[in-house]
Image (cartoon, rainbow, N blue to C red):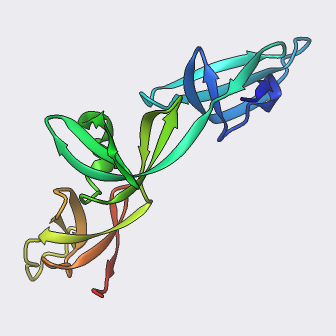
Amino acid sequence: MAVLSYNEILSKCVITYNGEPYEVLSAHIFRMQQRKPVNQTKLRHLVTGKVTEISFHQNETVTEADIEKMQAQYLYTNREESWFAEEGNPKNRFSFPADATHDKIQWLMPNSTVEILTYEEKPITVTIPVKVDLEVKDAPPAVKGNTVSGGNKLAILVTGAKVNVPLFINTGDIIRINTDSGEYVERVEKA
């Protein structure tokens, strides 16, 4: 693990602060009048997701976090836990609390491949693709003259997620979803 001085703590960097892994969201080095330079940072805790602001002074150093990536398959969610298995090693199973991963799990079908970030060989967070293709399980029929509200309706996907879609989307269509915003992107032609 590399030791970083205060001016090497830049955005997108992953550091260990107080024994915990943090991702640097933003960093700004500045000097106030006759004082020594300071690096004002915003850090996001990789386990809890909590964002904090920390100032690093010229004499401070931190270590770069030893983060590994692992490919895994999403298995299922049951009793408030989402279960995964390491790809190529199905005996290595682990879980996350469902409330911590709900915003990501709602876009995944069983056996979907995901990326797991590990810290000190323990899984800490799930990374999913930015765009996923899912089938529409239920979409109410379009009613003529219903375009005053912008021409959208609420559709339910096979994973149970609810998305606003255009009126021409029907049950059984495959649509592409942006997992960051949770919005409809486009209809995908069936292969």
Q: Is residue 27 left or right of residue 178?
A: right
Horizontal arrangement in the rendering, residue 1 relative to residue 142 (left or right): right
Residue nearest the viewer, comparing 112 with 188:
112
Does residue 180 show up?
no
Based on the displayed image, in which of its 4 quarters is residue 109 positioned? Answer: bottom left
Residue 20 vs 100, above or below: the answer is above
Q: Position of residue 40 (x, y in %)?
A: 70, 24
Q: Residue at x 16, y 66 (%)?
A: 155
The N terminus sits in image quarter: top right
Residue 29's spot in the image, x, y percent?
79, 28
Judge by depth and name the residue closer to the eye, 44 or 105: 105
Instruction: Determine the residue positioned at 77% across, 25% down.
Output: 3
Q: Looking at the picture, tell me which residue is in the foreground, 54 or 90.
A: 90
Residue 118 visible in rendering: yes
Quadrant hosting residue 135 = bottom left
Residue 16 position within the rendered picture, expressed as x and y whole percent measured from the top left: 62, 23
The answer to which quarter of the image holds residue 21 is top right
